[in-house]
Amino acid sequence: MAKSLTEDKSKQQAVAVPKGKRSYKIAVMGGDGTGPEVVREGVKVLHALEKSAGLSFEFTDFDLGGARYLKTGETLPETALAELKKFDAIYLGAIGHPDVKPGILEKGVLLRLRFELDQYINLRPVKLYPGVETPIKDKGPEQIDYVVIRENTGGIYTGVGGVNMKNTPQEVAVQSAVYSRFQVDRCLRYAFEYTRARNKRKTLALCGKTNVLTFLFDLWERAFHEMGAKDYSEIRRDYYHVDATCMWMVKNPEWFDVIVTDNMFGDIITDLGAMTQGGMGIAAGGNINPDGVSMFEPIGGSAPKYTGKNVINPLAAICAGGMMLDHLGEREAAQRLENTVVKLLQSGKMKSMSAGKMGMSTSDVGDWIASNI
């Protein structure tokens, strides 16, 4: 299942990660398609930081994904889940295989990891770097710099519902979004704390649909304003319907500081945000358990048509490694990584964020950042 550089897993301690402890055990899941290629470049950059920032990483590979499923019929074995709980963080390339029916890997690996590791926050910076093109006219890095916090373990993705009379004219399918006050409160608490620590515009916007999803977002809205008024009076609170949020993300992205929303709306608006910041090649995200094991990944999929061609953009995976460093308390190293990415983007060496059009190979990008960090 896993291949360790030290092989001594008996000494790995579960969860509790001291911030900035300088030595980390990282589970690496390259996954499918181009996933192993991009995460390899991220590991390369982290190795470079070992030498220059006094860090130590022990990387352990896990062969989870479509190839394993096709070979064994397993998605996420219990033994793998138990092992993953012992690491400081998980570094993911991509999950998704063209020969595996949609939903099997997504539910069997990704969603199960989020649920069973209680990664209840999906953290998605939407940040346009200098030198990267955006499809939004007359907007630049000063206008596109905000964060979306998506509740990650509740809502409609939990699979509450079912199908009756399947494959008949009377077939009925039901899938319900379910939230507890506990789930909503802990997501909002994280969002308020994040907004306070970010200390930019000190504005937290709730994205919902109170005019139609009246039961669900009445809960979110009441909890939002109660918590904000009681514990975060210095933070301005805004509310936007999800359709309006999509419009303003394109028309006036500078309005946003931090957005908090539910699982489904968050899934949708973060992909829109990714396109405004230059596309999937640069967008990174984290699945966060503030008190446990978190997982960091590029937002783009496995892109199987580019597999093995050394043309896929690894910057999103490299930036995900930077998010992992920041989460682990290595903020100076994370900033150095981001600064080096910006330096590359400003150098003109990369002609595009799109696969096959970068003017550099996948490994060239990783080599350049590793050499200059």
Image (cartoon, rainbow, N blue to C red):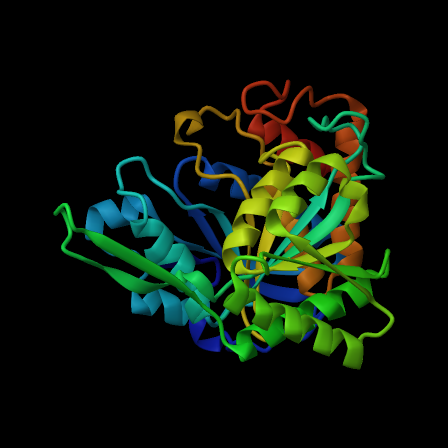
Where is the C terminus found, in terms of image quarters?
A: top right
The image shows residue 325 at horizontal and vertical percentages of 68, 57
| Residue at 59% in and 18% down | 357
Residue 301, given in percent of the width and then of the height, sits at 47, 39
- 81 displayed left or right of 248: left
Measured as percent of width and height from the top left, residue 362 is found at: 57, 29
Residue 63 visible from this viewpoint: no
In front: 301, or 142?
A: 142
Q: Residue at x 66, y 47 (%)?
A: 245
- Quarter holding residue 164: bottom left
Visible residue check, residue 226? yes
Residue 252, placed above or below residue 165: above
Tell me the quarter of the image containing the N terminus. Answer: bottom left
Residue at 67%, 32% (x, y): give it: 278
Viewer-nearest residue: 149 or 310: 149
* Figure check: 12 above or below 76: below
Q: Position of residue 163 (x, y in %)?
A: 22, 58
Indicate the quadrant where residue 289 lies.
Answer: bottom right
Question: Residue farthest to the front?
Answer: 211
In this picture, residue 326 sits left or right of residue 115: right
Residue lying at 80% horizontally and 28% vertically, measured from the top left: 346
Q: Is residue 152 above or below residue 219?
A: above
Report the number of discs.
Answer: 0
**17 and 148: which is toward the camera:** 148
